[in-house]
Each structure stands twice: as C-alpha cells, then as structure tokens.
Image (tube, rainbow, N blue to C red):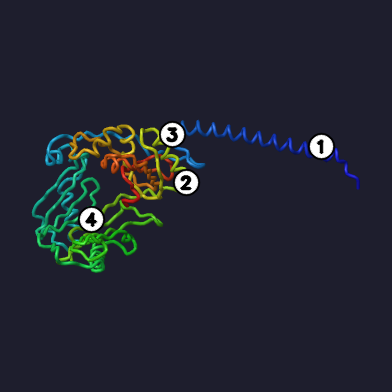
C-alpha cells in the first residue's frame, strides 16, 4: 500500500493546531475561573462566608471587641456587681449545685463560708463554697457547671515524702471514676512530677496529671480533667474539669496553604526575615493575639517586654470561645537580636490558621508547638 506523505503531514499539522487551540482555550477558561473565584471570595469574605476548596463555609473569625479593664486593686475589679448578677445564676442556685456535687462524690456538704468573685474582664461569676472539711468547690455562674474542688487542709504537703507516678495515677483514676467519668472517655496526656531534682517523670511530693478528650491523634486541652496528687496522704490537692466543646471542623486547608497564609500575613507587619517555618495540626482556642499584634505592634511588644506593665493599660479583646482544628504555624526569625528580651519575645511568632476556612483565628508570641 502506498502512503500519501503529504496527506499524513496535513493531518498531523491539523491535529497539532486543534490541540494548541484547545490548550489556549483551556488556559483562558482557567484564567476566567481564577478571576471569578478571586472576586467571589472577596465578596463572600466581606459577607461572613469563606470559600475553601470547593465548598462555602461560614466565616469563623469576627473582628474582636476591645474590653476596657477598670483600674484599681484586684479585689475591687473582681467584686461582684449588680450588673454581673443579671448575667449569672443566683448564689442559692449555685449552692444547690455545689451541695449536689459534694453528695455525689461522698464529700462533706456542710458549707461554712463563701469566697465568690467576678472575672476582671467579663461579668462571669465564679461561686466558691468552703466546706466544713476545708474543701473549696467552684461553680461556673453562667453555665452552672462544676469547675473544681481544692483541698485547703494545711498538712497535705510534705516535700520530703515522695509518691511514685504509678501511685499518683491510681489515686487520680479513683477520683476520675468517683466524679462519674467513663473509662476511655478521656485519656492521660500529661504527667508532671514536682520534686527537688527537677525530673518530671520520677517520684515527687506532688504529681500533676491531665486527662484530655482525643479526636484521632489530636487532643483537646479545653475538654480536660486536671488532677494534682499530694504525697503525704496520697490525696488530691485539686480536681478540675474544663469543658469547652470542640467544633470538630473539617480539614480542608493543606499544610502548604497554611504556611503561605501565615507568611502573607506576616508581610503586613514590619518583622525580621523568616529563618525557618514549622507546622503542626492541633486543636486550639481562638484568641485575639495575632489581631492585637498586627494592629498594635509597638504596644503589643511593650506589654510583653515591660515588667509589671499595668493591667488596666493593656489591650484586651473579647472573642468567642471557639475551639477549632487549626494549622499551628511557627515562624522563627533570623537571630539579629542584641537584646535578650527581644530575642526571647520577638524571635518567634505562631499563627493559628483555621483548618476549614483558612482564616487566622489567633496566635502566640512564642513557639507554641514547643510549649505544647
């Protein structure tokens, strides 16, 4: 069979031309989609919705409200006011809850005195009741939940008598069950032994134990039980329950995207050159630290670096109690610091990047991953 070489060349040329045209049209379409997506994202963000991946998500971050702290001594600014009472349950209601809890755990429920106070930066009241046996129980005035119980007996600590970690865990587990928590509901995530040698895994005169709820490999420090066991009588120093539920939000933002978001945000503020960057997926509590830093940089570092900076002159912001899955991105800056205070306080910055929306939902002035 004879092949017509000219026809074959013509077909190849036509095929290449069609492929090139398709490629050009595809690129044009991608550019159009990119422009539309960018414009749409801007509109959505301004309306409280964010575009992440291929879905729309409600914006989590809201501009925080600045809170003014009154001047005066601590007693005055934490004194319960008529205004704060309106936002909390009554003392009698809290007392009933305290007595019920004390009876549940077989403690003496005869209350002999009180020591209530209001948070200095909000109207939340913490109702504290002291029992005849010298235990102090605390009830959250807004949620009605048990918060903690402290052993105020003076003879419970002996720094010369040690208890092993295993012995402390056995006592802590006894109270864990006594307070009604189920096996496997929380897991022990931290143990710290207080001793003269500074070795937190060896026997000590007091051992602190944290149990946290876990979601896969991630632990929620804000759904936590903290217990301290004293060596002398092998009894609790305190038992505390922190209960701020986790949103368990979807993982949409990639690690690389989170890094770029943090680096782009850091360019908005006059910082040092970034030497290295590390990331970790964690459960964090939303805060206003990154917002405060970028909007008030000079004062932000002045507060951190000045000993005894007046509390009433600090910047405080109110944000929602949101617990979110986030990429924790730690930026380490080049070490060009002559002042050790600056090296410690300005050598790092940590951004919290929401794992679903990609919003910056908080931060920390140090290496947050190393601290945790």
Residue depicted at 42% across the width and 31% down the height: 46
Q: CA distance from mark 2 to mark 4?
A: 35 Å
| Element carrying mark 4 | strand
* First along the sequence among labels 2 and 1: 1
* First along the sequence among labels 1 and 4: 1
Q: Is residue 92 left or right of residue 302?
A: left
Mark 2, Cα crowd under 10 Å, few <14 / some 14-19 / many 20+, is few
Front residue of 148 and 346: 346
Q: Position of residue 82 (x, y in %)?
A: 15, 37
Reading the image, the residue beneath label 1 is 10
Q: Are marks 2 and 3 in contact (CB under 8 Å)?
A: no
Q: CA distance from mark 4 to mark 3?
A: 39 Å
Q: Are marks 2 and 4 in contact (CB under 8 Å)?
A: no
Indicate the quadrant where residue 359 lies: top left
Residue depicted at 34% across the width and 53% down the height: 220
* First along the sequence among labels 2 and 4: 4
The correct choice, above or below, for 277 with respect to 266 in the image is: below
* First along the sequence among labels 2 and 3: 3
Numbered mark located on residue 45 in the image: 3
Mark 1, Cα crowd under 10 Å, few <14 / some 14-19 / many 20+, is few
* First along the sequence among labels 1 and 3: 1
Numbered mark located on residue 240 in the image: 4
Reading the image, the residue beneath label 2 is 254
Q: CA distance from mark 1 to mark 4?
A: 82 Å
């Amino acid at each position: 069979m004879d092949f017509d070489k000219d026809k074959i060349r013509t077909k190849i040329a036509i095929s290449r031309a069609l492929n090139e045209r398709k490629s050009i049209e595809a690129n044009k379409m991608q550019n159009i989609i990119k422009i539309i997506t960018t414009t749409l994202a801007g509109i959505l963000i301004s309306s409280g919705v964010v575009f992440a991946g291929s879905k729309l998500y409600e914006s989590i971050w809201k501009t925080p409200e600045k809170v003014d702290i009154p001047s005066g001594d601590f007693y005055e600014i934490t004194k319960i006011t008529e205004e704060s009472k309106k936002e909390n349950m009554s003392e009698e209601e809290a007392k009933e809850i305290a007595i019920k809890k004390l009876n549940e755990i077989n403690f003496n429920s005869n209350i002999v005195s009180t020591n209530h106070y209001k948070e200095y930066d909000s109207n939340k009241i913490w109702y504290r009741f002291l029992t005849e046996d010298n235990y102090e129980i605390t009830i959250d005035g807004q949620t009605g939940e048990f918060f903690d119980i402290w052993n105020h007996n003076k003879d419970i600590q002996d720094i010369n008598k040690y208890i092993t970690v295993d012995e402390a865990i056995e006592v802590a587990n006894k109270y864990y069950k006594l307070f009604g928590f189920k096996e496997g509901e929380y897991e022990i995530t931290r143990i710290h032994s207080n001793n003269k040698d500074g070795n937190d895994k060896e026997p000590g005169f007091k051992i602190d134990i944290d149990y946290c709820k876990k979601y896969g490999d991630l632990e929620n420090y804000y759904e936590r039980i903290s217990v301290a066991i004293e060596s002398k009588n092998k009894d609790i120093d305190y038992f505390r329950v922190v209960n701020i539920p986790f949103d368990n939000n979807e993982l949409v933002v990639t690690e690389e995207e989170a890094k770029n978001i943090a680096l782009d945000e850091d360019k908005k503020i006059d910082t040092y050159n970034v030497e290295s960057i590390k990331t970790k997926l964690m459960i964090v509590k939303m805060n206003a630290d990154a917002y405060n830093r970028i909007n008030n940089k000079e004062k932000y570092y002045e507060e951190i670096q000045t000993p005894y900076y007046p509390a009433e002159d600090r910047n405080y912001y109110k944000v929602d109690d949101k617990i979110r899955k986030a990429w924790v991105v730690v930026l380490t800056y080049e070490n060009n610091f002559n002042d050790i205070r600056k090296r410690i306080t300005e050598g790092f910055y940590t951004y919290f990047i929401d794992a679903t929306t990609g919003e910056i939902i908080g931060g920390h002035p140090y290496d947050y991953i190393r601290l945790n």
